[in-house]
């Protein structure tokens, strides 16, 4: 037997020796996952030739990242986000037929039990910020309205915080609501203009961004999950194209098709109809759902 | 501007968009490290096409691994070990000139302040296990003895535990010692025959090994760090080639050149000279140090 036949590890055969141990893995998928991860890890090590100190820095970075995670903070998801991994997984799982609205990352601030509200409700409970009215239609890929579509919307306030980040400061369920379309597929509600905000950057991921010369900001956006029987659920955002961070979202969530126009309207009559003071922002955006089975693989 | 010029993320340009943000990184090395890690991560995701649930499993595995780490337990090092990453980093950093002894992983059980002992001392303080005498020479690559070489040795007991894993059960500094060569470069000391043992497998890495159908054992070995002025420090093991796990070390630490013969000797006279009962194990092994600057890059 030579060294290879005995299964001894060398720089040359490192991947085969390690993955060769997985013959009795509990599933073929796990075996495949570990084969690819091991191969790519070893490729990275061979390309970078890290010193022992650099290897230890990587171990300590991962350890600090793990220690930062608790019930309210998921630092490994932030790491996945800022490395574009979350968006890549989202893209791979949501290849859309032509014309359907594109998806983007869910983010950590969705809550499951936001209240269902009548169409037109104002989801801004503390009235802080610049008034906004937003509406449009939920359509299928042939442009037909979808009835009984459920629109779950949430956003940060004009200081860049979600209610769950400011418990006791913002009212519970501030800037969250669930709406249901009628036969015409139309939706509308009132809110405030969202603002850019930083992802939580007081941990190892924030330090990494700092070392990379990267800012921690996401451009202003509203989050949506839109569900309808017979259609693929759409998890997405709409973005303000005039936001200073629109070309540098730290989690890479922006797509061309998710840009919506936020128009400033000076119309005292309409403002009063909406219960606003005078000026307000107006956004129109249609969402197009793919039928179940219509996604490309 | 098209989507690419605007810097929006797509499946196709994912690596370029993410690494393109690192223009102002604090060092060229960090920029290079993040370029390679991002590229290999994205390659792995594109090859595996994980579902959102699989991605979340990976996040949760890393989180559990981080939460397992404390002052006494480094689960990310174990993960690096069982994926062959630790051995690969060791191999890359210790390419030896022909004839020099090969290195292997340090492991987590070295302690810095083991006592310096007179040559021939018995490092087994509780006399539990099968007696062993072990000796040889510290040489340069031309076969000349190295004087004043410092040999730091440590091993598990015959139940597979290091003293630091059994505080209060084993005496402090059991099976540890530091020896210094004279002009002849010779060393010898007494100990007990080591035994195979499992790496700590009650955490996420142990669960992963289980799912992969892999055992958690390391074959029996002694650890060495050998230092001498003007020579590269050698961190290595010697292994018992007859160990049941010699071809399947769970951390891939075995190399052909690190196999030493453990011979059982029945010689009552010599046994008495060593202070042993009757039978004992005898090991001879020379170590060859590379001069500083003699390592291959």
Image (tube, coloured by chain):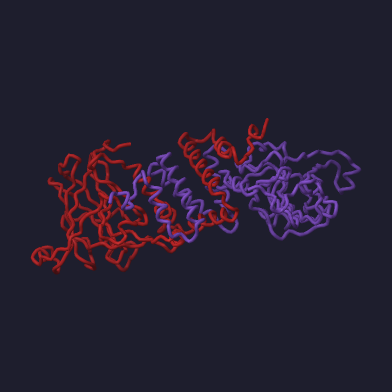
Chain colours: A red, B purple
Confirm whether residue B257 shows in the render: yes
Q: Name the one closer to the observer, B274 or B11.
A: B11
Residue B96 x %, y %? 68, 46
Left or right: A140 in relation to B29: left
Horizontal and vertical percent position of residue A170: 29, 66
Q: Nearer the viewer, residue A275 or B89?
A: B89
Which residue in the rendered view is the most extreme toward the right? B269
- Place residue A176 in its image quadrant: bottom left
Q: Is residue A277 above or below residue A95?
A: below
User: Which residue appears farthest toward the top when viewing the image?
Assistant: A1
The percent position of residue A204, horizontal first and vertical second, equals: 47, 60
Camera-side residue: B67 or A237? A237
In the drawing, does residue B283 fall left or right of residue B6?
right
- Say whether residue B200 is visible: no
- Rendered image quadrant of residue A9: top right
Viewer-closest of B63 and B251: B251
Q: Is residue B73 left or right of residue A236?
A: right
Number of callouts in the render? 0
Q: Residue at x 81, y 38 (%)?
A: B264
Residue A235 in percent (x, y) is at 29, 48
Residue B17 position (above or below residue A31): below
Is B265 situated left or right of B76 in this image? right
């Amino acid at each position: 037997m030579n060294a290879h036949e005995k299964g001894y590890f060398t720089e040359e055969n490192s991947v085969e020796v390690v993955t060769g141990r997985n013959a009795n893995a509990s599933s073929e998928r796990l075996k495949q996952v570990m084969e690819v991860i091991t191969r790519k890890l070893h490729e990275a090590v061979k390309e970078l030739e890290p010193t022992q100190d650099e290897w230890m820095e990587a171990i300590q970075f991962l350890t600090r990242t793990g220690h930062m995670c608790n019930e309210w903070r998921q630092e490994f998801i932030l790491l996945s986000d800022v490395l574009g991994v979350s968006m890549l997984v989202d893209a791979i799982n949501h290849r859309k037929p032509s014309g359907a609205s594109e998806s983007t990352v869910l983010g950590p601030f969705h809550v499951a039990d936001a209240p269902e509200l009548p169409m037109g409700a104002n989801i801004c409970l503390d009235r802080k910020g610049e008034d906004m009215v937003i509406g449009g239609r939920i359509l299928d890929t042939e442009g037909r309205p979808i009835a009984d579509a459920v629109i779950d919307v949430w956003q940060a306030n004009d200081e860049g915080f979600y209610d769950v980040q400011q418990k006791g400061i913002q009212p519970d369920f501030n800037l969250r609501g669930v709406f249901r379309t009628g036969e015409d597929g139309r939706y509308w509600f009132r809110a405030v203009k969202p603002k850019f905000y930083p992802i939580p950057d007081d941990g190892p991921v924030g330090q990494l961004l700092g070392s990379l010369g990267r800012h921690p900001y996401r451009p202003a956006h509203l989050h949506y999950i839109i569900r309808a029987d017979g259609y693929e659920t759409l998890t997405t955002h709409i973005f303000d194209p005039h936001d200073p961070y629109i070309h540098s979202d730290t989690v890479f969530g922006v797509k061309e098709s998710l840009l919506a126009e936020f128009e400033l309207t000076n119309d005292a009559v309409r403002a009063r109809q909406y219960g606003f003071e005078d000026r307000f922002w107006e956004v129109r955006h249609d969402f197009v759902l793919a039928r179940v089975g219509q996604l490309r693989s």
